[in-house]
Image: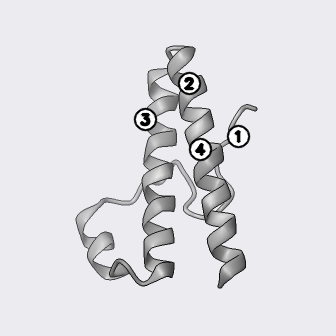
Amino acid sequence: MHEHLVALEERMQRLRHAIRQAIAQRETTRTGTLHAELRRTQQAWEVLCGLNDPLSDLQSEPASSTVPHGSSGPPLGD
């Protein structure tokens, strides 16, 4: 479980960096896409920590067909 938490935390850090870059480049569509992926990654982290019920999240937020839910996602643009 620890490895999964670390992987999710690293993913959140990369997403935050990519969001800052997208904001600086005024890429509003990409910023929104990355932010949605960050929210999903944060929810996965909370579920893994036992802080959140995964079923309530599925009912409250519609799924996006354009961005995958796994640890791989859109290129983050280092």
CB under 8 Å between discs 4 and 1: no
Nearer-N-terminus badge (4/3): 4
* Helix, strand or loop status at disc 2: helix
Nearer-N-terminus badge (4/1): 4
Nearer-N-terminus badge (3/1): 3
Left or right? Give the position of 14 relative to 56.
Answer: right
Q: Which mark is residue 22?
A: 2
Dot 2, crowdedness within 10 Å: few (<14), some or many (≥20)?
some
Nearer-N-terminus badge (2/1): 2
Total marks shown come to 4
Q: Which mark is residue 75?
A: 1
Left or right? Give the position of 37 relative to 11.
Answer: left
Amino acid type of the residue that numbered disc 3 sits on in the rendered structure: Gly
Dot 3, crowdedness within 10 Å: few (<14), some or many (≥20)?
some
Pointer 3: what residue? Answer: 32
In 3D space, how far apart are the residues under numbered discs 3 and 1 (Cα atoms)? 14 Å
Its colouring scheme is one colour
In 3D space, how far apart are the residues under numbered discs 4 and 3 (Cα atoms)? 11 Å
* Helix, strand or loop status at disc 4: helix
**Mark toward the viewer: 4 or 1:** 4
Q: Quadrant of the N terminus?
A: bottom right
Nearer-N-terminus badge (4/2): 4
Amino acid type of the residue that numbered disc 2 sits on in the rendered structure: Ala
CB under 8 Å between discs 4 and 3: no
Residue 45: percent from left, percent from top: 50, 70
Q: Residue at x 64, y 51 (%)?
A: 73
Q: Quadrant of residue 61?
A: bottom left
